[in-house]
Image: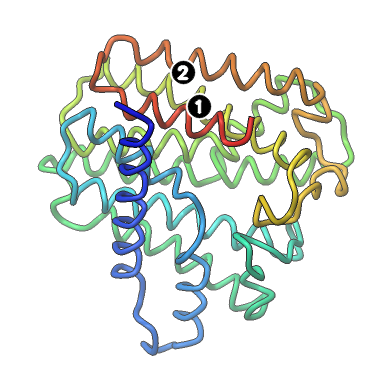
């Protein structure tokens, strides 16, 4: 598969998920119109859609129906969007820019932003609970539980709690990894496993994908820390250097930029090794690993 082929694939699937998100979100003007308008503002028209793309790539590996994967991909992206809205609130990271435009609470207000996050989370589970996501109701329940665990106190929300508690502190590398496995890695892991679960895959294959996803999820955060330190606000679409300004522990503050980049490449290599048994079926996931790790360096 060539790079041009991959770029075409990315653009086609970004357009597909954007259209699906437009359809699943409450339409403009539906009561309550301000809340629904804010939900659409927070989700549509921005972001690389890395998590849905990972779901599509793992769905291709397992021979999944495209419509089923799209529903699972929407659920993951809605959870991700809700987390960004809440993370940006003054009581959390207090940021004013997201995806190149004012954050939800700046464009609307704090109360509306809080309700946007609540509503997007509920809508995500509505998407997964829809009949027909899987031909096996037991598998569908497993998928719902997976996303719940990835989003909750043992996953993304728990990671954010640790992040807030760690401000101004120096963490050891295992502590930093533990935080980001939860805060960032668990939802990326869910994206990969949910996409694969939409098709046919055995437990051994799921184990391999799980190892891939854990490595690439952690690599994603390491790269984010490097980009936050080295890129501009215009490039990132969010406030650059904010972690350093807020005295938050990052891979760059702990290891330095050069060593952090080396860590990202090591995680990338480990992720690829987990895909070795799949042959050409995993080519899209390999390309997605490139997409995640080589965003700017």
Identify the colour scheme used: rainbow
How far across and how far down the image is residue 166, in percent? 80, 39
Q: Residue at x 53, y 34 (%)?
A: 185
How far across and how far down the image is residue 194, in percent? 31, 38
Above or below, 250 relative to 202? below
- Left or right of residue 236, residue 58 in this image: left
Q: Nearer the viewer, residue 198 or 17?
A: 17
- Left or right of residue 108, residue 247 in this image: right
How far across and how far down the image is residue 198, in percent? 21, 39
Q: Residue at x 48, y 34 (%)?
A: 291
Quadrant location of the N terminus? top left
Pointer 2 and pointer 1: residues touching (CB < 8 Å)?
yes
Residue 167 occupies quadrant:
top right
Q: Nearer the viewer, residue 80 or 140?
A: 80
Determine whether the residue tagged by mark 2 lies in a helix, strand or loop. helix
How far apart in space, not on screen, are marks 2 and 1 (Cα)?
6 Å
How far across and how far down the image is residue 121, in percent? 45, 60
Quadrant location of the C terminus? top right
* Circle 1 Cα neighbour tier, 10 Å, few/some/many (<14 / 14–19 / ≥20): many
Q: Residue at x 65, y 56 (%)?
A: 237
Identify the residue position indicated by label 2 in the image. 271
* Circle 2 Cα neighbour tier, 10 Å, few/some/many (<14 / 14–19 / ≥20): many
Residue 3 occupies quadrant:
top left
Above or below, 153 relative to 86? above
Residue 184 occupies quadrant:
top right
Query: Looking at the rendered structure, which numbered label has been put on residue 216?
Result: 1
Query: Looking at the rendered structure, which numbered label has been put on residue 183?
Result: none
Of mark 2 and mark 1, the one earlier in the sequence is: 1
**Number of on-image labels:** 2
- Left or right of residue 26, residue 281 in this image: left
Q: Residue at x 76, y 46 (%)?
A: 164
Determine whether the residue tagged by mark 1 lies in a helix, strand or loop. helix
């Amino acid at each position: 598969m060539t790079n041009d082929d991959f770029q075409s694939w990315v653009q086609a699937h970004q357009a597909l998920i954007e259209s699906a998100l437009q359809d699943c979100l409450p339409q403009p003007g539906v009561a309550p119109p301000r809340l629904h308008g804010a939900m659409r503002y927070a989700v549509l028209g921005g972001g690389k859609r890395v998590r849905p793309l990972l779901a599509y790539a793992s769905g291709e590996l397992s021979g999944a129906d495209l419509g089923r994967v799209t529903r699972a991909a929407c659920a993951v992206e809605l959870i991700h969007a809700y987390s960004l809205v809440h993370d940006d609130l003054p009581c959390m990271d207090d940021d004013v820019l997201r995806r190149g435009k004012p954050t939800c609470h700046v464009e609307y207000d704090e109360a509306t932003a809080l309700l946007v996050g609540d509503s997007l989370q509920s809508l995500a589970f509505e998407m997964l609970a829809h009949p027909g996501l899987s031909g096996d109701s037991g598998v569908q329940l497993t998928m719902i539980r997976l996303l719940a665990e990835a989003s909750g106190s043992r996953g993304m929300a728990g990671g954010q709690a640790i992040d807030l508690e760690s401000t101004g502190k120096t963490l050891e590398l295992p502590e930093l990894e533990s935080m980001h496995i939860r805060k960032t890695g668990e939802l990326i892991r869910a994206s990969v496993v949910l996409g694969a679960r939409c098709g046919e895959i055995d437990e051994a294959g799921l184990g391999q994908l799980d190892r891939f996803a854990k490595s690439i999820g952690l690599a994603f955060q390491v790269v984010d820390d490097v980009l936050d330190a080295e890129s501009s606000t215009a490039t990132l679409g969010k406030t650059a250097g904010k972690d350093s300004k807020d005295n938050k522990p990052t891979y760059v503050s702990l290891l330095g930029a050069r060593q952090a980049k080396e860590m990202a490449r090591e995680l990338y290599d480990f992720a690829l090794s987990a895909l070795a048994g799949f042959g050409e079926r995993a080519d899209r996931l390999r390309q997605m690993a490139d997409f995640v790790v080589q965003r700017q360096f």
